[in-house]
Amino acid sequence: MSDISEKKSAQGHLHPLTQVATEIVEIFSDMGFAVAAGPEVEDSFHNFDALNVPEDHPARDMQDTFWLKPLSDKKLLRTHTSPVQVRYLEENKDKLPIKIVVPGRVFRNESTDATHEAQFYQMEGLLVDKNVSVAHLKGVLETLFKKIYGNETEMMLRPSFFPFVEPGFEVFVTCFKCHKKGCALCKQTGMIEVLGAGLVHSNVFKAVGIDPKKWQGLAFGVGLDRLVMLKYGVDDIRQLYAGDLRFIKQF
């Protein structure tokens, strides 16, 4: 009879979300970004007010936000990783310039389907320095996507509105399925939206006591789930959370 100590159990491996998050953190570390973290239970000031989100903005409604009782405390499950930007700026406003990335879990009170989950993961980025421009934003994001998807990957910025940046952009990259030929997934455009980005709004700086005439910044927020789906061709976000080892072992 063989010694039971000689038997080796099967070796596991990292979840694809963890793999991609680690890869992105390493890419940004090479560009001089530090990693920051913050609480998943947030308050209204850090999640909305300091980020220039108006009182009547739809994102504050119960349909989008998990508010925690008692409501008088205005506690909630964070709806994005952007509150960490605010907290980090509060704590480090005398140590500028800064460059951080923030991987973390966020929560939205919405129905689950192939592209939406009530909880998912984001990666936030923030760079604050003097004379920051859209060119810097474009350079940082192009470096990220070429490292993840290959040097042939193309990126496009389309003007859009987000309360905490001005100007703001929706960011698109080459469709992984048709490689810019046009398909149902990318709605025949050849490009897929992957994140929102822009230059930090002056009101965000004012909320934390930083002079927006002296300092500027760029910020972006990307869904890690979306990046995993694009990288590996996963067509249903729910597969990432189902705990099915037959699926996980593919990566």
Image (cartoon, rainbow, N blue to C red):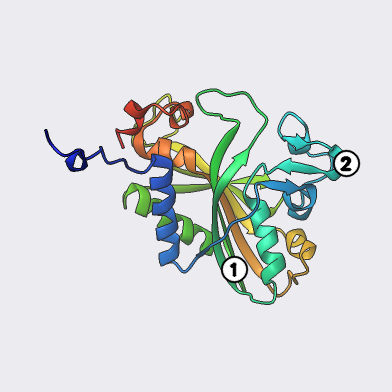
Q: Position of residue 49 (x, y in %)?
A: 79, 51
Quadrant housing the C terminus: top left
Q: Is residue 180 left or right of residue 4?
A: right
Asked whether residue 170 is in view, the answer is no
Q: Secondary structure at mark 1?
A: loop
Residue found at x 74% / y 70%: 210
**Crowdedness near tag 2: few (<14), some (14–19) or many (≥20) residues, C-alpha within 10 Å:** few
Asked whether residue 69 is in view, the answer is yes
Q: Quadrant of residue 95?
A: bottom right
Q: Position of residue 154 (x, y in %)?
A: 39, 48
Q: Is residue 80 left or right of residue 61?
A: left
* Image position of 105 with respect to 177: above or below: below
Residue behind mark 1 = 132
The amino acid type found where label 2 is placed reads Ser
Q: Viewer-proximal residue, 11 or 128? A: 11
Q: Secondary structure at mark 2?
A: helix
Q: Viewer-proximal residue, 159 or 3? A: 3
Q: Is residue 73 left or right of residue 182?
A: right
Q: Quadrant of residue 125?
A: bottom right
Residue found at x 39% / y 26%: 244
Q: Position of residue 227 (x, y in %)?
A: 44, 41
Which mark is drawn over residue 72? Answer: 2
